[in-house]
Image (cartoon, rainbow, N blue to C red):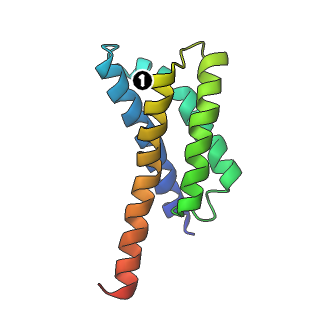
Amino acid sequence: MKSRAVLWSLVADVVGIIVFVTIGRRNHDEGVAPAGVIETAAPFVIAALVGWLIARGWKSPVAIGTGAIIWVTTVALGMVLRKLVFDDGTATAFVIVATVFTGAVLNGWRLAVRTRQARLTTGS
């Protein structure tokens, strides 16, 4: 896989997490100042990077399996880091919303790319 595709894939994942955090902060009237967004996103971005390592995401960054590993790691490890390292809450409702939203984002763009690639390959 070309290094540019790997970089764009990593950026897409991080941007998806930042969008999730920004929407959440806005919905809870916490403000969307960059410092606050970065602080809230940090455990999830760190976890996503670990997910990239576990999945060896650079080998097949748009694969659905890669996205699934990154997603599960982002949510599970992200919540652990958020609670134990960043001393923030992990209410059940938040875990559910984070799981659904990040699942849609981290896997959704991959599904769109794979669908487009398949259409280009088959000419439809």
Q: Is residue 60 above or below residue 118?
A: above
Helix, strand or loop under label 1: helix
Instruction: Look at label 1 and name its amino acid.
Output: Val
| Of residues 61 and 34, the one drawn nearer to the viewer in this rendering | 61
Q: Crowding at label 1, few (<14), some or many (≥20) Cα neighbours within 10 Å?
A: many
Report which quarter residue 116 is drawn in.
Answer: bottom left
Q: Is residue 41 visible?
A: yes
Quadrant showing the N terminus? bottom right
- Relative image position of residue 111 (x, y in whole percent): 42, 62
Q: Residue at x 55, y 14 (%)?
A: 88
Q: Residue at x 43, y 69 (%)?
A: 114
- Residue under label 1, please give it: 37
Q: Is residue 35 above or below residue 75?
A: above
Quadrant showing the C terminus? bottom left
For the image, the number of numbered tags is 1
Residue at the right extreme? 54
Q: Residue at x 61, y 50 (%)?
A: 69
The reply, left or right, for residue 28 in relation to residue 102 is left
- Relative image position of residue 89 (x, y in whole percent): 53, 15
Q: Is residue 32 visible?
A: no
- Relative image position of residue 48 (x, y in whole percent): 58, 41
| Of residues 8 and 25, the one drawn nearer to the viewer in this rendering | 25
Q: Is residue 124 above or below residue 52?
A: below
- Relative image position of residue 113 (x, y in whole percent): 40, 65
